[in-house]
Image: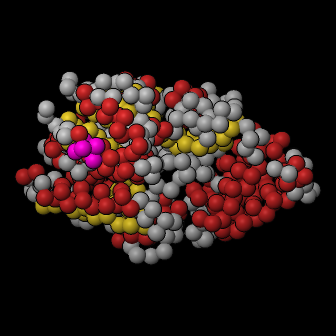
Amino acid sequence: MSAVTVTVPRDTAALSVGADDVAAAIVAEADRRGLAVTLVRTGSRGLFWLEPMVEVVGPDGVRHAYGPMTADDVPGLFDADFLEAIDHHPLAHGPTDSIAYLKDQQRLTFARCGVIDPLSVIDYRTHGGFVGLDRALTMAPEAICAEITHGGLRGRGGAGFPTGIKWTTVREAPGPTKYICCNADEGDGGTFADRMLMEGDPFLLIEGMTIAALAVGAREGFVYVRSEYPRAIATLRAAIATAEAEGWLGEGIHGTDRAFHLHVRVGAGAYICGEETAMLESLEGRRGQVRAKPPLPAHEGLFGKPTVVNNVLTLAAVPVILAQGAAFYRDFGAGRSRGTQPFQLAGNIRRGGLVELAFGVRLTDLVHRFGGGTLSGRPVRAVQVGGPLGAYLPGDGLDVAADYETLAETGAMLGHGGLVVFDDTVDMARQARFAMAFCAIESCGKCTPCRIGSQRGVEVIDRIMAGENRAANRAVLDDLCEVMAEASLCAMGGLTPNPVRSALAHFPEDFKRPPTARAAE
């Protein structure tokens, strides 16, 4: 019998629930039974409620899934003839691609995650990798920028600025030195797509950044990763070394006269460094504080040079556009929101994980059809969309299309695509207080509305919750939110009022509860 390929994720989420133990148990059990197994450590498919999810490649090449597995389950897995892809085990889910959660997605960016060995160039090439870069190497810089513009790609970090326009601005900026910076400082609670991709398909990010470099004339780039992602950092560094050895990075990219050098830099975990200018300050060796704009980084960015700053998901979408063409990518999406968005389902949810779909999917589908509602089984009361500075939407108000413009019309924002779900036991006054407290802790301190406003916001909400002169304090809170939104130097202070205002608008009863009732909880 020839060796059967078995995959076990090496993704951080899978490791946290025992994936290494499962992998070791599979190898040991195969050895004990004299069976030939080739174990491949992949990224995660993003079905977190099934992790660790073991897959076996059947005789017909179809992958079959089993999970969530523990090391103790492994002997029974072999007893059930799982190496022959016979789905008799209680934890068998049949062909992986037929699992409804995965089958109903439209995976462009995450097509390879959980499928390939993240550090194998051969695997990456076999599954369509570097096709976009091959094409870009034959194109003029302005043609690459035009392709990205026509594809409708917008920044996946929150603001949704057209990527092609940003690249064109940097390309046309004077001077021989330009930089590509990837902001991988993923700090929103309930988000993990950047980490998943860096751990599960790092060559995709490398390819996207290299295409960006060709488009604007940059020879050097940086990936800024938060220190809380040690496995992503190690995987990226190993992938960069391999790409250089294989001729996909460094001097003479793939036999041409083009060059691009890529470096990983580790941040200290400041949320504010998710803001592009604070990240640039940190990259230059200073404290992470926002810069006044203008000038924009596209004109004066890293070390004062024209700089492209995009996040992981934006740059990872680029190779698909170059490989398949702008028209292919534009076919996905709705309105001015083109392509796909990796949504991340977290919080009190039955099936947490990553769902990649075209823009326009309804929030209710994400929460209920994919997520399965709350893990507690209680009704969904609120969903925060777009990270800790995003608005809270009521559970009965989720029939909303998930795209940039539609969410903005409801007072919400897409952000990094994170959805955090709460059931009907949540206290929304406390959630509003959390928003202000979070801002107070994470503020860079440069501007008064954010630095002082957030502190005062915590105090005012505390007084409201304590029942002290609620009408007057509510008026103060409204004024404070307006000042923060209109006068803060960056989005940190400017967006903090969003969760507070939405909690007040949709859940006013929580701000009127008797203090004794809250104290009794």
Start-end of magenta stretch? 28-32
Q: Nearer the viewer, residue 101 or 254?
A: 101
Task: Please report the residue visible at 51 percent of the width from the left and 66 percent of the height from the top.
Answer: 270
Picture layout, residue 298 above or below residue 204: below
Residue situated furthest bottom in the rendering: 286
The answer to whether residue 296 shows anywhere in this view is: no
Give the side of residue 436 with respect to residue 274, left or right.
Answer: right
Considering depth in this image, is 201 or 207 the residue closer to the camera? 201
Q: Is residue 122 magenta?
A: no
Number of marks: 0
Closer to us: 292 or 309:
309
Name, please, the residue furthest toward the front.
Answer: 32
* Image coords of residue 101 (percent x, y): 45, 28
**Image position of 177 with respect to 80: above or below:** below
Q: Give residue 398's position: percent from left, percent from top.
A: 63, 30
Q: Residue at x 23, y 51 (%)?
A: 119
Q: Identify the coloring.
A: secondary structure
Say which quarter of the image contains residue 446. Answer: bottom right
Residue at image position (43%, 28%) is 90
Q: Can the viewer see residue 353? A: yes
Q: Position of residue 406 (x, y in %)?
A: 57, 33
Above or below residue 186? Residue 345 is above
Q: Is residue 492 left or right of residue 43?
A: right
Describe residue 228's horizontal placement relative to residue 1 as left or right.
right
Whether 503 is drawn above or below 61: the answer is below
Q: Position of residue 56 (x, y in %)?
A: 28, 33
Q: Residue at x 74, y 41 (%)?
A: 425
Image quarter (top left, top right, bottom left or bottom right) of the N terminus: top left
Q: Main secondary structure of the magenta part?
A: helix
Q: Which residue occupies the extreme right position in the image?
A: 469
